Image (cartoon, rainbow, N blue to C red):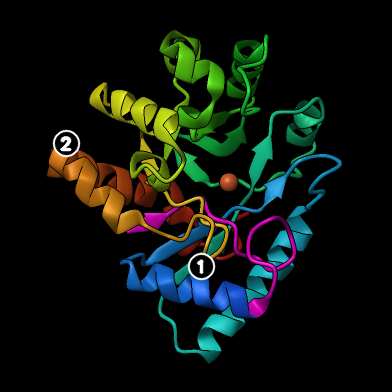
Amino acid sequence: MYDLHCHLLPGLDDGAQTAAEALSLLRLAQHNGISHMVITPHINPGHFDNTKAMIHKGLVALKQLAKEHQLTVRLAAAAEVRLCAELPSWVETSVLPYLGEYQGYKVLLLELPHSHVPEGTDRLVKWLLGKNVLPMIAHPERNREIQSDLKKLQPLLRLGCLMQLTASSVLGDMGERSQQTALELLRQRTFHIAATDSHNQHRRPPKLAEARDLIASLCGDDYAQLLVVENPKAISQIHFNDKTYV
Ligand SMILES: [Fe+2]
């Protein structure tokens, strides 16, 4: 399986804080059946001011650690970028790392505030599409406005945004509202990928296999396979074919 949203570059965000913690998460992920990971530290101005260079440096160190411990999981890195005023200038100046590519677009893992969908998000998405950047919305099932009214997602879906389900949401670990919203969006086949959004062993450990099995029982094996293998593999393959891709 492919995991395209997780936080385990030590010290870059609120995910793994130490090399030992990152290593135990890598072991858990591999044991869970994850063969490829694109690690996505937060980029959020004033909170997590990560740059492409910092992320790349963290990835090189983690790959070395994984090699020393004979882990076989393949590693790459991108970022989970918070919707913010700086976003257009970051796109213009090519400073953001991308999850990969899909239908000729670069894929940006975009995090909305958890409380609502800000006014003008659809205009920003149109602008991004014009710059050949396709947003993948991180865990829409955890957004409180979307939980109350699924129609809030429609403008973004109509524009072609990709949607990422967090495995622990559908398993119920993120609370009942996230789970119910995830189940309804799964019923509507809204999601393009499922990912762990893992942070540490206790808070959001990698449970992609458990989510895949639940999705398969609800929506069928084909859709489950699409979410944890086929789509994330297609999007991220450029990272694993071309090691210089950022
Ligand atoms: Fe995340």
**Mark 1 is on which residue type?**
Leu
56 within the magenta span: no
Name the spot of residue 48 as percent of width and height, x first.
79, 48
Q: What stretch is highlighted in magenta?
A: 1-19
Is 45 displayed left or right of 162 in the figure? right
Return the residue at label 1: 75
Question: Residue at coordinates 48% horizontally, 72% vertically from top-left?
Answer: 26
Residue at the far front in the pictured view: 176
16 within the magenta span: yes
Dot placed on the residue nearer the N-terminal end, 1 or 2: 1
**Badge nearest the viewer, 1 or 2:** 2
Secondary structure under the numbered disc 1 in the rendered image: strand
Return the residue at label 2: 218
| Vertical comparison of 196 with 121: above or below | below
Name the spot of residue 70 as percent of width and height, x first.
45, 89
Magenta: main secondary structure:
loop
- Distance, label 1 to label 2, CA atoms, is 30 Å
**Quarter of the image where one finds residue 129:** top right
| Any part of residue 190 in sight | no
Quadrant (top left/top right/bottom left/bottom right) for the N terminus = bottom left
